[in-house]
Each structure stands twice: as structure tokens, then as C-alpha cells.
Amino acid sequence: MLFIGSNIVVQDNFGIRKVKCIRVPKKGYAYLGSLILVSVLKKDSNKKRIKLGQLFKALVINTSNINFRKTGQWTKGFNSVIILKKSDNIPISKRIKGPVCFECRKFKMSKILSMGSYIF
């Protein structure tokens, strides 16, 4: 689960490496597939279009807590991972580095599933 003030790793190739969570949904925590508002903490040095403290909308694609599936399986990620997105459920970047959780299909994000390196 992600709370306000959590430091999160970004998994796409837009040029941002770490962000801080600013706003989460009404429940008080963010779970798999929820939209959050983040602020930039760390970026690549050669990207001039990104400023530290800039705000982005993001989509949670993996969390560090245990996710139970309907089939009885469970998954656990190493850390919480997000991707930055536009106004729709379309990501800003063109590639996602690393695995993508299968539950993204339930939230109608099949474009994200096709961009990831593999699905778990």
C-alpha cells in the first residue's frame, strides 16, 4: 500500500527515477491500479524538460505488499512501482522497464500490459 509521503520508484523511460506521493484516493492508501499525484525527487541528468518538484499523475502497477488473486495465488513485489500517465490511461513513455502485474487487465489497461517486458 502507498501512503502520502511514500518514496516510489518509476519504471518507465520518461527520465524520472524517484517520486514522492502527494495525493492518494479517498481510502487513504493507494493499491494496485489506483491513480495518485506525485512530485519529482530524482531525475536523469540529461533531461531538461523535467524539473524537480514537478507534479505528475501516476498509475500504480505493482506494490510491495501481498496481492491475493481469485485463483488462490498471491504475488509480492520488491518495491512499489508506478508509471506516469496522461489524462487517459495512456502512459507518457513508450516503454516500461520490468514486469507488469496481471491485474492491470482487470482495470482495462491492456496497453500497459503490452508495453511491459513480461507479465507476472
Image: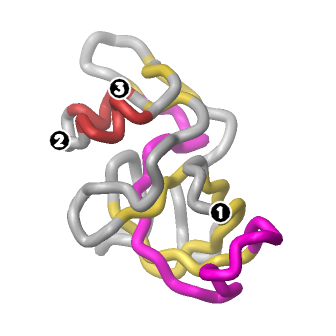
Residue 64, position as x, y percentages in the image: 60, 41
How many marks do you count on the picture?
3
Residue at image location 61% in from the left, 81% down from the top: 49
Say left or right for 102 vs 52.
left
Whether residue 7 is visible, yes or no, is no
Q: Which amino acid does the dot numbered 3 rest on?
A: Phe
Determine which residue is flagged by label 1.
15
Image quadrant assignment for residue 7: bottom right
Which residues are the magenta region? 42-67
Judged from the image, the secondary structure of the residue bearing numbered disc 3 is: helix
Say left or right for 6 vs 67.
right
Q: Which amino acid does the dot numbered 2 rest on?
A: Lys
Residue 53, position as x, y percentages in the image: 65, 88
* Mark number displayed over residue 102: 3
Judged from the image, the secondary structure of the residue bearing numbered disc 1 is: loop
Judged from the image, the secondary structure of the residue bearing numbered disc 2 is: loop
* Mark number displayed over residue 108: 2
Task: Sort mark 2 into few (<14), some (14-19) or many (20+) by Cα contacts within 10 Å.
Answer: few
Taking depth in this image into account, of 82 and 34 the one nearest to the observer is: 82
As for residue 85 lying within the magenta part, the answer is: no
Residue 22, position as x, y percentages in the image: 52, 81
First in sequence, mark 1 or 2: give its number.
Answer: 1
Image quadrant assignment for residue 79: top right
